[in-house]
Amino acid sequence: MRIVLVVAGVVLMALGLIWFLQGINVLPGSFMTGQMQWAVYGAIAFVAGLLLFVRGRRRI
């Protein structure tokens, strides 16, 4: 289960970063480019992925 959380967290952080960069118009070439709502969605996804990653790496 821990591996699944870590992998899901990394994937979600990567997607969130891409969405954020497209939303702030750094990565062009998509319908998301320059749309501030995608920057917000990306930031939320990145934080959610970070929480999953930390949860998966935590020792109990």
Image (cartoon, rainbow, N blue to C red):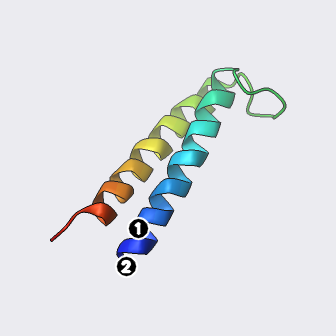
Q: Residue at x 63, y 37 (%)?
A: 19
**Relative to 22, 47 lies left or right:** left
Label 2 Cα crowd, 10 Å radius (few <14 / some 14-19 / many 20+): few
**Relative to 48, 58 lies left or right:** left
Q: Amino acid at mark 1?
A: Leu
Foreground: 44 or 57? Answer: 57
Kindly identify which residue carries mark 1: 5
Q: Residue at x 57, y 30 (%)?
A: 39
Image position, residue 18 (x, y; %): 64, 38
Specify the label residue 31 is tagged with: none
Real-space CA distance between mark 1 and mark 2, rounded to the nearest whole angstrom:
6 Å
**Relative to 51, 42 lies left or right:** right
Image position, residue 35 (x, y; %): 68, 25
**Relative to 39, 45 lies left or right:** left
Instruction: Identify the residue at the far right of this view.
Output: 29
> Mark 1 touching mark 2, by CB under 8 A?
yes
Image position, residue 7 (x, y; %): 49, 64
Q: Amino acid at mark 2?
A: Met
Looking at the rendered image, the quarter that the C terminus falls into is bottom left
Q: Is residue 45 above or below residue 5?
A: above
Q: Is residue 19 above or below residue 59?
A: above
Q: Residue at x 42, y 64 (%)?
A: 6
Label 1 Cα crowd, 10 Å radius (few <14 / some 14-19 / many 20+): some
Tell me the SS state at disc 1.
helix
Kindly identify which residue carries mark 2: 1
Instruction: Identify the residue at the far bottom of this view.
Output: 1
Tell me the SS state at disc 2.
loop
Q: Residue at x 59, y 32 (%)?
A: 20
Q: Is residue 9 above or below residue 43?
A: below
Quarter of the rendering containing residue 1: bottom left
Image position, residue 32 (x, y; %): 73, 33
